Every structure is written in structure tokens, then in C-alpha cells.
Image: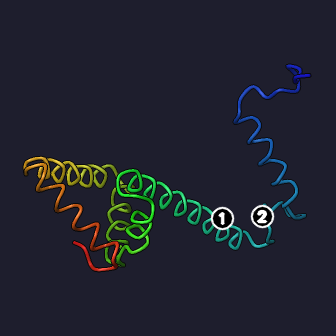
């Protein structure tokens, strides 16, 4: 009924890499360029778009789930989808700095730690009120800083 030891992969990564190799064989042209296009630059752009799209969908789903547990799914959806261009660009810029170098990661990590310490130095009620007010403004599409 089950798979014999010769048929079963040792690790999930074995199975995944077998699948990737199969797709690569099917998508390679006569010159060995993997992907749907014969132009490797086009294939790189296609892969980049797919990876960024998957990352964005995953990020939005996780953000909605985190907020939705406390505030409800409708409110969470409004908050995530009404993020301003400034907020989006700031998050992108900070992420770029953090991922480009160790000093950048330390700088961003230190800044986040300082913000957490500052938030904890204020009263819990005051800090929560400020955060919830910012989320309400953002859910209405207003600029929240």
C-alpha cells in the first residue's frame, strides 16, 4: 500500500528539487536557457515578478491575520489596504537598508529596539490608545504617522 523505501524521497527537499529539475528540463530550449522565454533576462524579470508577488500576498495575509485576531478581519483589511505611499516607501527603504549590510541591520534593529523601549516607557494605556488611533485613521485612508 505504501511507498517502498526506494520510491520514497529521503527529504522533502529531494522531492522539491526533483520537481524543479523536471520543470527546468521542460522549459529549457535547445541552448539550455531555463524558463519560458529564450531570453535569460526576460526569464529573470518573470521570476522577479513572481517572487515579489508571492511575497506581497504572503505579507498582506500575515498582516491581516495579525490585526484580525484583535480587531476583526474587516478592520484589518482596511488598515492593510489603506497604507499610504509614504508608509510603503518608508518600509521598503528601511528593509533595503536592513538587508544590504550588517551595519544596516544593526542600525535598523537598534532603531526598532529604541522604539519598543520608548513605547514601553510610556503608560500601557497611552501607548495602546495612540496605536489604535493611528490604525483607525489608516483604516479610513487618512495619513497616520
> In the rendered view, does 107 fall on the left or right side of 70?
left
- Dots 1 and 2: beta carbons under 8 Å? yes
Q: Residue at x 64, y 65 (%)?
A: 50
| Residue 57 position within the rendered picture, expressed as x and y whole percent measured from the top left | 55, 62
Q: Secondary structure at mark 1?
A: helix
Residue 69 lies, with reference to residue 35, above or below; the image says above
Q: Nearer the viewer, residue 20 or 77?
A: 77
Determine which of the numbered discs, if any, sits on residue 47 in the image: 1
Q: Residue at x 22, y 72 (%)?
A: 145
Image quadrant of residue 132?
bottom left
> In the rendered view, does 139 fall on the left or right side of 10?
left
Residue 85 lies, with reference to residue 65, above or below; the image says below
| Residue 23 position within the rendered picture, expressed as x and y whole percent measured from the top left | 82, 54
Residue 41 lies, with reference to residue 97, above or below; the image says below
Q: CA distance from mark 1 to mark 2?
A: 9 Å
Q: Nearer the viewer, residue 13 or 61?
A: 61
- Check disc 2: other Cα within 10 Å, few if <14, some if 14-19, many if 20+: many
Amino acid at each position: 500500500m505504501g511507498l517502498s523505501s526506494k520510491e520514497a524521497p529521503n527529504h522533502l527537499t529531494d522531492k522539491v528539487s526533483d520537481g524543479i529539475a523536471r520543470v527546468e528540463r521542460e522549459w529549457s530550449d535547445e541552448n539550455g536557457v531555463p524558463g519560458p522565454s529564450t531570453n535569460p533576462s526576460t526569464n529573470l524579470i518573470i521570476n522577479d515578478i513572481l517572487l515579489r508577488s508571492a511575497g506581497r500576498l504572503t505579507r498582506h495575509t500575515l498582516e491581516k491575520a495579525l490585526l484580525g485576531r484583535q480587531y476583526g478581519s474587516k478592520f484589518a483589511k482596511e488598515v492593510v489596504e489603506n497604507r499610504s505611499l509614504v508608509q510603503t516607501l518608508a518600509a521598503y527603504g528601511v528593509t533595503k537598508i536592513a538587508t544590504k549590510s550588517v551595519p544596516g541591520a544593526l542600525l535598523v534593529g537598534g532603531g526598532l529596539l529604541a522604539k519598543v523601549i520608548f513605547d514601553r516607557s510610556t503608560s500601557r494605556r497611552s501607548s495602546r490608545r495612540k496605536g489604535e488611533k493611528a490604525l483607525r485613521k489608516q483604516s479610513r485612508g487618512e495619513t497616520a504617522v
